[in-house]
Image (cartoon, grey):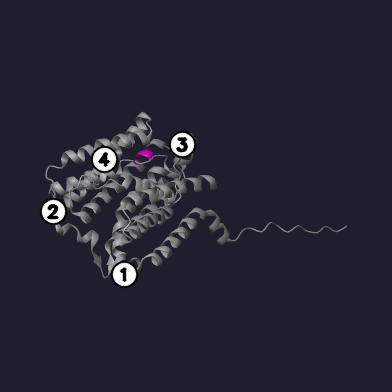
Amino acid sequence: MTTVPVPAARRPSRLRRFVRQHQNVLIIWGVLLLVLVGSAFASESFTNPRNFPNLMRQSAALLLVCLGQTLALLVGGIDLSVGSVISLVVVIMAALMQPTPESMLATLVVGLFIGALVWAVNGFMVTRFKLAPFMVTLATLSIVQGLALQFRQNPQATIPREFSPPFTGDTGGIPHPFLIIVLATTAVWLLLRYTRFGRHVYAVGSNENATRLSGINADRIKLLAFTLCGLLAGAAGVFTAARSRAGDPLIGGDFAFDSITAVVLGGASLNGGAGSVWGTLAGVFIVTVLSNILNLAGIESNYQYIVKGVLLVLAVMLYRRRR
């Protein structure tokens, strides 16, 4: 009696494995493509070449914030204070900066330091006293916003005109905000993808107790992730200062909600351990394009808040159902 050999199970192709592994990212980029096509049909002004630099300027600051928000969410935290941090950075830069290279460079460093310092303190409160990141950053939002209003000694304080071109200008027709987006996204992706710190970030967010038992210092990973989140918020404040050139203590008001919306749209979990830089990038572009097309269509800002709120609810429902 002869036996018929049973063929071995076929391994899925490399393409199929890639699609299965990056389903959420591919879905959100597909949604972005639909939004872009719909916007192009909705308004001729959207496809005007002069609108591209405007989109990049709108996206750059939000992306820097969202990259930091991604790090915070990956380790099981959240950043509600990012808007007030940006406001504080802008106000202090406007108050201190003089139209000299030395002053502009020193003030830029101060702006970055403020962002990193605020979140280092937040991270210390979370890791040392085991406080919930939501409550810590909610308190920080109020404290830092009050400081921003207090430091606004001169309502007419402005950023020197010479500070703006390196951030909002262009080189060879390529907008500098676009270069900032590419460099920042690539840097954070490399950090999460190819470093031990990046692997530990995902591990801490997925299962902190198991990570501790494996010998990883989870508190140190969280503190470093939170500090990087603050550093990126400081960078967003520097870019916002260069773009607006106004010492407005309320300029960062929308960043917290917009950043959470964009990052959750990109597939990050509010429970930690899940999310990607490329998904965040797509989420940022979706939020920015929708705001841009609504502005071009003359839609009032009240309705824009409604659209963003609906997007956030739908994204949370969709990803929770998929998981």
Q: Which residues are magenta?
A: 220-224
Q: Is residue 189 left or right of residue 232?
A: right
Residue type, numbered disc 3: Glu
Please provide percent x and percent y for residue 221.
39, 40
Please provide percent x and percent y for residue 28.
46, 56
Magenta span contains residue 221: yes
Q: For the residues labelled 3 and 1, say whether their Cβ atoms are less than 8 Å apart.
A: no
Residue type, numbered disc 1: Pro
Residue type, numbered disc 2: Glu
Please provide percent x and percent y for residue 202.
45, 44
Instruction: Give the foreground label among 2 and 1.
Output: 1
- How packed is label 4: few (under 14 Cα within 10 Å), some, or many (20 or more)? some
User: What's the CA distance linking mark 2 and mark 1?
Assistant: 35 Å
Q: Main secondary structure of the magenta part?
A: helix
The residue that mark 1 highlights is 49
Q: Nearer the viewer, residue 294 or 202?
A: 294
Q: Earlier in the sequence, mark 2 or mark 1?
A: 1
The residue that mark 4 highlights is 117
User: What's the CA distance linking mark 4 and mark 1?
Assistant: 39 Å
The residue that mark 3 highlights is 208
Q: Which mark is residue 102?
A: 2
Q: Earlier in the sequence, mark 4 or mark 2?
A: 2
Residue at 42% from the left image edge and 47% from the top image edge: 312
